[in-house]
């Protein structure tokens, strides 16, 4: 079968790598792809939001399955566009992708169906938000309602910071229309855990746990980014936590969406906070996480195409989802200055060091070809991943592996997975 993957980052590279292992697949395309993805797929110069062109390409090339990697096209309705033309596509429809597309919607859903989450209020007027903050307890969290590249969340320690945050989101429009409505919620403390799942509208199958590092600098300092590294599994995601989440969060979320007439097929990413009162939902995403995918898929035993098809066909209950009994760590190599100002176009060397190296992977996030060279083309450039028998071993291997890749202005955090030492 022929598969088209939509996206251009490290997540899509990991998906392409995994799809390439399927015995069912004869040809992979990726739109628009990147330099690393081209090892497994023929890259096509079509943007992720060019729905008409994507649909036309899928029809002309007799694509059997399209996999949507990114959030923007899902929220924009790309799955609906494909289904309208009778094409098989993996991902939630527009009316289900709202689970990620609107934080106000997802918070209201959780309140209505008693799914544990932080106390909150929604505001579509800056005046009302500022008035609410006059008496609100600090610290507090402000969230842009819409998509904001994973950066539309402000943690405010003082009332002044919170007031300034409202101005940034709602008046200065730092994230555009995403800030037309904001969610103001209580600040929760505890360990964060990411849990990805496959969903077929009724059945949910949980993948292995992971933990992301969002801040740009060591010690969780600096600005929020798209993610500077991950590890899997999380030692804090215990059987007790899993049992609680299965009972009160996972299936409850799938059932809630169905009850609202928004049947969800695809990936639900649960961002969890393990609080003293128990696990609570921080956020939902409607697609694979990035860079969580880069540590989860290398540990997955199943043929991923079979799982995608089961989600589409409503037969996920027949899939025995399995993961290796080991660990993986991903360290993101970024351009110095990310997420604000950074230069691109630097030649990357050292890829040959990973040839035939079992248990090591380099997933490209922001790269492109410049003649025969691969050069940097983004803030997050590469995700260097290593597996090990446990988290400490995987972490040590991943950091050793980062030494094998070089480019000018290379930057990384040096404490990815340091929480492992505290487990």
Image (cartoon, rainbow, N blue to C red):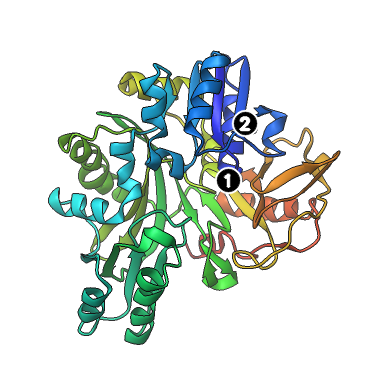
In the image, residue 249 lies at what x, y percent?
24, 46
**What's the residue at 33%, 58% (across, down)?**
145
- Counting residues from the N terminus, which is met first, the one under dot 1 or under dot 2? 2
Q: Quarter of the image containing the N terminus?
A: top right
Residue of label 2: 17
Task: Look at mark 1 in the image and give the residue it sits on.
Answer: 328
Q: Tag 1's secondary structure?
A: strand
Q: Residue 392 lies in what quarter of the image?
A: bottom right
Residue 370, compared with residue 145, is above or below; it is above
Cα–Cα span, label 1 and label 2: 16 Å
| Left or right position of 79 against 396 | left
Callout 2 secondary element = helix
Can residue 195 be seen?
yes
| In front: label 1 or label 2 | 2
Residue that sits furthest to the front in the current view = 52
Q: Is residue 410 left or right of residue 323?
A: right
Q: Which residue is located at x 24 percent, y 63 percent?
A: 118
* Residue drawn at 21 percent across, 75 percent down: 128
State whether residue 138 is above or below residue 194: below
């Amino acid at each position: 079968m022929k598969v088209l993957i939509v996206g251009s980052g490290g997540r899509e590279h990991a998906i392409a790598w995994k799809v390439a292992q399927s015995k069912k697949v004869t040809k992979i395309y990726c739109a628009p792809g990147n330099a690393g993805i081209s090892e497994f797929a023929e890259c096509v110069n079509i943007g992720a939001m060019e729905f008409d062109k994507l649909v036309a390409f899928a029809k002309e090339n007799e694509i059997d399955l399209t996999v949507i990697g990114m959030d923007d096209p899902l929220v924009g309705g790309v799955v609906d566009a494909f289904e309208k033309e009778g094409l098989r596509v993996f991902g939630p429809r527009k009316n289900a992708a709202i689970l990620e597309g609107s934080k106000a919607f997802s918070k209201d859903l959780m309140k209505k169906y008693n799914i544990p989450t932080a106390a909150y209020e929604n505001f579509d007027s800056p005046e009302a938000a500022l008035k609410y903050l006059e008496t609100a307890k600090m610290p507090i969290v402000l969230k842009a309602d819409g998509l904001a590249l994973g950066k539309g969340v402000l943690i405010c320690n003082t009332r002044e910071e919170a007031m300034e945050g409202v101005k940034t989101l709602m008046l200065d429009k730092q994230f555009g229309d995403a800030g037309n409505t904001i969610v103001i919620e209580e600040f929760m403390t505890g360990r964060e855990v990411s849990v990805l799942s496959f969903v077929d509208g009724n059945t949910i199958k949980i993948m292995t746990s992971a933990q992301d590092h969002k801040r740009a600098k060591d010690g969780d300092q600096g600005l929020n980014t798209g993610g500077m590294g991950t590890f899997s599994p999380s030692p804090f995601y215990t059987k007790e936590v899993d049992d609680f989440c299965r009972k009160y969060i996972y299936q409850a979320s799938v059932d809630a969406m169905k009850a609202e007439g928004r049947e969800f097929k695809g990936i639900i990413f649960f961002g969890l906070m393990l609080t003293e009162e128990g696990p609570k939902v921080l956020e939902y995403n409607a697609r694979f996480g990035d860079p969580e995918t880069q540590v989860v898929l290398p540990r997955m035993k199943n043929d991923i195409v079979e799982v995608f098809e089961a989600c589409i066909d409503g037969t996920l209950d027949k899939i025995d989802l399995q993961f290796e009994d080991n660990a993986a760590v991903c360290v993101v190599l970024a351009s110095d200055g990310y997420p604000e100002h950074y230069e691109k176009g630097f030649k990357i060397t050292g890829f040959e060091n990973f040839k035939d190296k079992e248990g090591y992977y380099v997933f490209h996030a922001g790269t492109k070809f410049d003649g025969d060279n691969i050069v940097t083309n983004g803030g997050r450039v590469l995700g260097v991943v290593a597996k090990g028998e446990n988290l400490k071993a995987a972490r040590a291997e991943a950091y050793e592996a980062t030494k094998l890749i070089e480019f000018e202005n290379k930057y990384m955090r040096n404490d990815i997975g340091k929480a492992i030492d505290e487990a």
